[in-house]
Image (cartoon, rainbow, N blue to C red):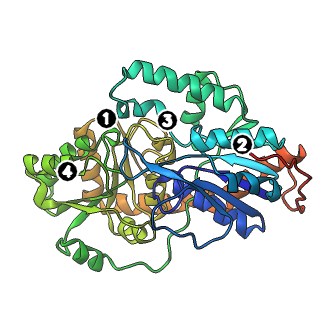
Amino acid sequence: MRIGIFSESYKPLINGVSTSVETLIAELEKAGHTVFVFTSSYPRFTDERTNVYRFPSVNSVIEPDYVLPIPISRRIAEAIPSLKLDIVHSHGPFLLGRLARRVARRYDIPHISTNHTLYTEYAHYFPLAPASWVRGFLVGMMRAYYNSCQQVTVPSRLTRDRLVSYGVTTPIEVVPTGIPEPPYILTPRDEIKERLGIPSTAKMLLYVGRLAPEKNLLMLLEAFVTISAEDRDAYLIVAGSGRSASTLKHRAENLGISDRTVFTGFIQRTKLDPLYRAAEAFLFPSKTETQGLAVGEALAAGTPAVVVNAGGAPESVSDGVDGFLIDDDPAQMADRALQVLREPDLRKRMSEAARSGSAHVRPNMIAMRILGLYEKLVYGETRTAMPLVSGPVDEETA
């Protein structure tokens, strides 16, 4: 099958969406399919793989780490008909998502789209307009866009229910992002702690993700005030970068926990598994996730997770089995984290349950589910084992 992936988020950008896209592409290609990627260009970045089409882009004034593509390119428009795409898969409803829709319509190709983000939770990024107006606009835009697709996938039941509440009537399938099994051999815990500059006796509590207002990280710091007072060996490791980094560091100083709080900055995904495995518990306060990919990664590494019971992240956790679900309350987060630190048998039991429970979201299994949806749209039935043949396409430009 010849598959067109349209996504603003793709390497070198590292976030949950780009990780999901890259994981899916790798598995599709392993299965023998040909994937063409349409995405943004980045200064001084050159692709190692072929079949990547990058549009000119401009810096985003909203998030400095992001760029906005300008989806106009004669070269790409002229190339699209010759690619003989069987299906178009967009990963967002904005600039490249709209281009995907135009390509699908022009060449009569099925269009599937994945909604990765609860965009209405990001209204604060548009301070010049009232939040209610921004949310209303986003709801209407998402409803119109996803109703123009033949199939929608989402990473959690919460996201599906939210789209349905917006008036989306297109079939919606819940398909979480695939999470690879961590390598068997990982960097020893003592070496990880030495790199972080903390004692070998330290008990590590870990957060991984962007440092942004919607991640609710001030609550995490408040929880650690209690944890650090109750357990003198506890250290909080905050792995990630973002616009809130300086605010959070300043807050940690004011709370008197900066000596036991380590802000690592951005860490490559390939280097996260040893960090997950070294931590006693993973703490996740965000309420705006569609899936909470970092929660799944922590569980796959055998690290119990303490997660605020809001958004899509709680769907990865079995409360009391491989972690704890809590209210948006620093006292509850502190209580559960301390329970994991104080009860080694509980932690061991949760760690084993976390690893075994992650087996159903391996990338190859998730890719097979996506392929099944592709084939149903292209052929009207699922027949994964059969070779896929492209039909003729119109010679117009996109």
- Sequence order check, earlier mark of 2 and 3: 2
- Sequence order check, earlier mark of 4 and 2: 2
Image coordinates of residue 365 in percent, x first then y, are 68, 59
How far is mark 3 from mark 4, CA to CA?
25 Å
The residue indicated by pointer 2 is: 112
> Furthest-front residue in view?
74
- Sequence order check, earlier mark of 3 and 4: 3
How far is mark 2 from mark 1, CA to CA?
35 Å
Nearer to me, 340 or 157: 157
Res. 85 visible in picture? yes
Residue type (three-letter) at the residue carrying disc 1: Asp
The residue indicated by pointer 1 is: 328
- Sequence order check, earlier mark of 2 and 1: 2
Which of pointers 3 and 4 indicates the residue nearer the eye? 4
Image coordinates of residue 376 in percent, x first then y, are 84, 45
Compared with 88, 388 (above or below) is: below
How far is mark 2 from mark 3, CA to CA?
18 Å
Where disc 4 sits, the SS reads helix
Q: Marks 4 and 1: CB-CB under 8 Å?
A: no
The residue indicated by pointer 4 is: 246
Q: Residues within 10 Å of mark 3 (few under 14, many from 20)?
A: some
- Sequence order check, earlier mark of 4 and 1: 4
- Sequence order check, earlier mark of 3 and 1: 3
Residue drawn at the location 79% of the way across and 58% of the way down: 83
Res. 362 visible in picture? no
Residue type (three-letter) at the residue carrying disc 3: Leu
Residue drawn at the location 30% of the way across and 40% of the way down: 213
The residue indicated by pointer 3 is: 118
Q: Residues within 10 Å of mark 2 (few under 14, many from 20)?
A: many
Q: Is residue 27 left or right of residue 131?
A: right
Q: Marks 2 and 1: CB-CB under 8 Å?
A: no
